[in-house]
Structures are given as C-alpha cells and as structure tokens.
Image: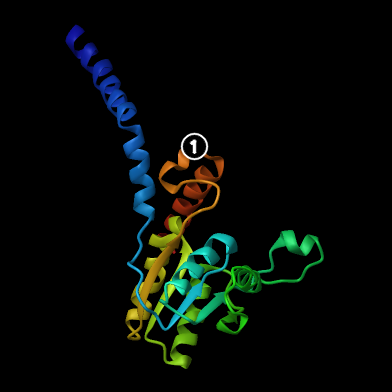
Amino acid sequence: MYKKLLLLIGIPVFVLLILFICRFSLMCAVANYLICEDTPSKSQAIFILSGAPTERSLKASELYKNNLCKNLICTGETHPQDFAALGIDVTEAELTKMSLVHLNIPDSLVALLKEGTSTQEEANAILKYCIVKNLTAIAIISSKFHTRRIRNVFKEKFSEKGIEVKILGASAIGYNELEWWNNEYGLIALNNEYVKLLYYCIK
C-alpha cells in the first residue's frame, strides 16, 4: 500500500520536475513549430501580407536591397480602426506601401492589391493576380509566427497552378520569437497563432 501511494505521488512529481527543468527548451520548441520559412531566392514578385506593416516592410526592404526582387505588392483591404478613429481612410495595403516608401523603396516599384480580409482571401487574390500576370516564382512575407499557417494555405493551391512560393518570415518588433514568454506581446502572438492554426485545420 505504501509503495503504491509513493508511486502515485512520486511519478507526477518526477514528471513535473522534468518539465520544470526543460521548460525553456519546451517553450522554444513551441515557438519553433510555428516558424517554417524558406531560404530567400530571386522572385518575380514579393507579396507583403496585411498586418504588422513596419516589421514586414523591413523584411521586404532587406530582400529588395539584396537584389532578390524589384516588384513589391502590398495586400489587404481592411481599414485599420486606429487610423479610422483619426479620420484617416487607409487600407492595410496602402499602409504597408507607405512604410516601404519610408524605407526608401521607390514608389513606382510598389503596387497595391487591395483585396482580402483574411489569409485565405489574400491567398485567393494573389493566386488570381499571379495567373493574370503569368508569375511562376513569388515570395510571401508575413510574421515569423504565421509562417507555418501561411505555408499550409499557399503551397498546395499555388503548386497546382505551377507557381513556386517562398514563405519568408519577418521578425517581430518588441519581442524575440524564441523568448516569447518574456513579453506580453509575444505571449499573445503565440497564443493567437495556435488558435488560428487550429481554426484553419478544422475549417
């Protein structure tokens, strides 16, 4: 009886102790699962998805300056509420373009695709654009934590049309993805992405 009780108490305590000792490695693994990027290469066009315009523009600017692409396209038709509250009527696509121009990307090289209020809708709009423009090699920029979900949404449907897609992640501003637990924004971003990943899998 005593041995059974010792096992019932000892095993959970041992498991909890192991989890505590390995907590940082486990939390890094949780973040690493979400980050699923390709190696950058030359593309006919880079599409910057809506949301987080500053960090995603920085990534696009880096690729442009490394001569990996000269054709940048900003997507998204949503009107950010913060700007609407100030009486500024601007879409996510236009906001991203403003950020790129601020980073010294020539205005003439940045196009707008003001379509899509979700990743799925943006993927459909980009696919139609690629077919019309006869693009066969493109890159997609989103936040690092979004890259696995973006890959799931884009890769198969674009491959069926003979379009090669590179998924590239932009580093977050304000927190380190591999130390997300040290920052409230990192915690929220990781939690939200797992919820979205689950939602897209079910849907």
Q: Which of 100 and 32 lies nearest the eye of the viewer? A: 100
Q: How is the image coloured?
A: rainbow
Residue situated furthest top in the rendering = 2
Residue at x-position 47% and y-position 92%:
132
Q: Residue at x 35, y 60 (%)?
A: 36
Rendering coords of residue 9 (x, y %): 28, 16
**Quadrant including the C terminus:** bottom left
In the image, 175 versus 106, the foreground residue is: 106
Residue 200 shows in this picture: no
Identified by mark 1, the residue type is: Asn
For disc 1, the marked residue is 182
Estimate the x, y position of residue 166 in percent, counting from the top left. 37, 72
x%, y% of residue 1?
19, 8
Q: Position of residue 130 (x, y in %)?
A: 45, 86
Residue closest to the far right: 87
Total marks shown come to 1
Q: Is residue 4 left or right of residue 178?
A: left
State the residue at coordinates (51%, 53%): 172
Residue nearest the viewer, comparing 53 with 129: 53
The reply, left or right, for residue 28 in relation to residue 92 is left
Q: Is residue 141 above or below residue 143?
A: below
Element type at mark 1: helix
Which class describes the residues within 10 Å of circle 1: few (<14), some (14-19), or many (20+)?
few
Q: Quadrant of residue 11?
A: top left
| Lateral position of residue 38 relative to residue 173, left or right | left
Examine the rendering and report whether any part of residue 109 can be seen.
yes
